[in-house]
Image (spheres, rainbow, N blue to C red):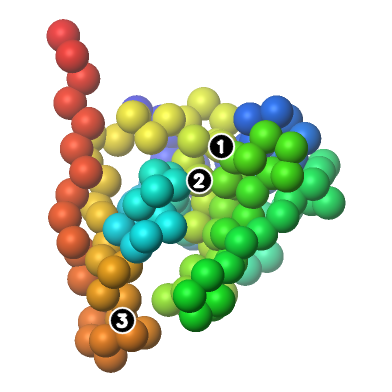
Amino acid sequence: MVGDTNNWAGQCHCGAVRFEAMLIDGFNSIRRCNCSYCRMRGAVVVAAEMGGIKFSQGEDALTSYRFNTESAQHFFCSRCGISTHLQRRSNPNLYGVNVACLDGVSPFDFYEVPVMDGVNHPNDTGGPARQAGTLRFIPAD
């Protein structure tokens, strides 16, 4: 398992986008989402506050995608297509940083990852955020 520090360097696959992320609670905020976009993208994310991502290179190489309510903004490298982070719909003051983009971190480092119910998003239902399930990684012998 990775360290418990809150400061992580990261980059996209091709290295065009490089950044440092200041996580608000280390990896304690790890999650996935089951909305249509996140389900297809498959990223595992951790939380950083607005201003908690500093780009050292390639911010101009980022492009973004919005869908449905256009509240969430998903950022990805325009060269290699890797999703680096997103601005959350549930709290636009938070980013979800793709753990696979953090140096030395893999989504497979985490035995269990909570999956949030983005299909029944609290902004749509008026109810509380709820966990839809848990994604588990069980390594082969």
Q: Residue 62: x and y, percent?
A: 74, 51
- Discs 2, 1 touching: Cβ within 8 Å: yes
Q: Is residue 47 left or right of residue 49?
A: left
Nearer to the camera, 95 or 74: 74
| Above/below status of 32 relative to 68 | above
Task: Identify the image quadrant of the C terminus.
Answer: top left
* Residue ID at (83%, 51%): 60
Binning the other alpha carbons within 10 Å of mark 3 as few (below 14), some (14 to 19) or many (20 upward) gives some
- Discs 3, 1 touching: Cβ within 8 Å: no
Q: Secondary structure at mark 2?
A: strand
Q: Which image quadrant is residue 11 in?
A: top right
Q: Amino acid at mark 3?
A: Pro
Q: Is residue 60 left or right of residue 138?
A: right
In three-dimensional space, the C-alpha distance between marks 2 and 1, rounded to whole angstroms, equals 6 Å
Q: Is residue 1 left or right of residue 96?
A: left
The answer to whether any part of residue 22 appears in the image is no
Q: Which mark is residue 122?
A: 3
Report which residue position mark 1 lands on: 101
In three-dimensional space, the C-alpha distance between marks 3 and 2, rounded to whole angstroms, equals 22 Å
Task: Identify the image quadrant of the N terminus.
Answer: top left
Q: Which mark is residue 98?
A: 2
* Residue ID at (29%, 69%): 119
Binning the other alpha carbons within 10 Å of mark 2 as few (below 14), some (14 to 19) or many (20 upward) gives many
Q: Secondary structure at mark 3?
A: helix
Q: Which image quadrant is residue 130 in?
A: bottom left
| Above/below status of 132 relative to 45 | below
Q: Amino acid at mark 1?
A: Cys
* Residue ID at (21%, 20%): 139
